[in-house]
């Protein structure tokens, strides 16, 4: 089984990069003929995606998509220093998302068969 690491840097609703990264993760998890272990690491403004109860005006809902990939056994980690920089460390996060460090990301990069950055 190959390990696919997806790294996202953009805000959840500032562009469609996180939306497309999550769409890809969902599809990778649904592949029958070539299963993959999928991991997602959120950096920069992408860390705001882990804040629960966001109410987008229309279109897609990032929290629901995160909950789908987590239910599919995807590990979702987000950068602790990015959260500290934004003053978000004391807030609740979507269940199943884990605060992590650049060391955690470096370890994932080293073991991943493929790394995709959005």
Image (cartoon, helix red, strand yellow):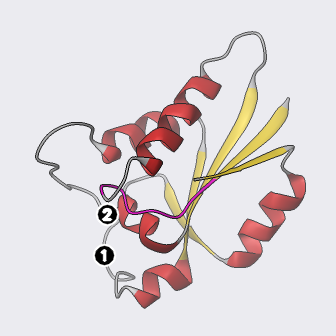
Which residue corresponds to the image point at 49% horizontal and 57% vertical from the top-left?
97
Question: To which residue does mark 2 refer?
Answer: 51
Marks 1 and 2 in Cβ contact (< 8 Å): yes
Of callouts 1 and 2, the N-terminal one: 2
Residue 11 is one of the magenta-drawn residues: yes
Establish if 35 lies above or below 102: above
In terms of secondary structure, where does tag 1 sit?
loop
Between 90 and 55, the residue placed more toward the observer is 55
Q: Is residue 16 left or right of residue 73?
A: left
How many angstroms separate mark 1 from mark 2 (CA)?
7 Å
Q: Residue at x 64, y 27 (%)?
A: 28
**Horizontal and vertical percent position of residue 46:** 45, 64
Seen at 83% across and 49% down, the residue is: 112
Secondary structure under badge 2?
loop
Residue on which the image places disc 1: 91
88 inside magenta stretch: no
Q: State the residue lying farthest toward the front.
A: 15
Q: Position of residue 104 (x, y in %)?
A: 73, 69
- Which picture quadrant has residue 86? bottom left
Q: Is residue 114 above or below residue 98?
A: above
Q: Is residue 34 left or right of residue 22?
A: right
Magenta residues (range): 7-13
Q: Is residue 24 visible?
A: yes
Lateral position of residue 15 relative to residue 31, left or right: left
């Amino acid at each position: 089984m190959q390990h696919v690491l997806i790294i996202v840097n953009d805000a959840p609703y500032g562009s469609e990069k996180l939306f497309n990264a999550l769409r890809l993760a969902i599809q990778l998890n649904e592949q029958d003929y070539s299963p993959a272990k999928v991991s997602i690491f959120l950096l920069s403004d992408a860390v705001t995606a882990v804040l629960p109860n966001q109410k987008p005006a229309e279109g897609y809902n990032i929290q629901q998509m995160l909950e789908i990939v987590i239910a599919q056994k995807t590990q979702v980690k987000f950068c602790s220093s990015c959260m500290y920089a934004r003053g978000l460390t004391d807030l609740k996060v979507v269940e199943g998302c884990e605060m992590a460090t650049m060391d955690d990301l470096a370890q994932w990069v080293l073991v991943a068969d493929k790394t995709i950055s959005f």
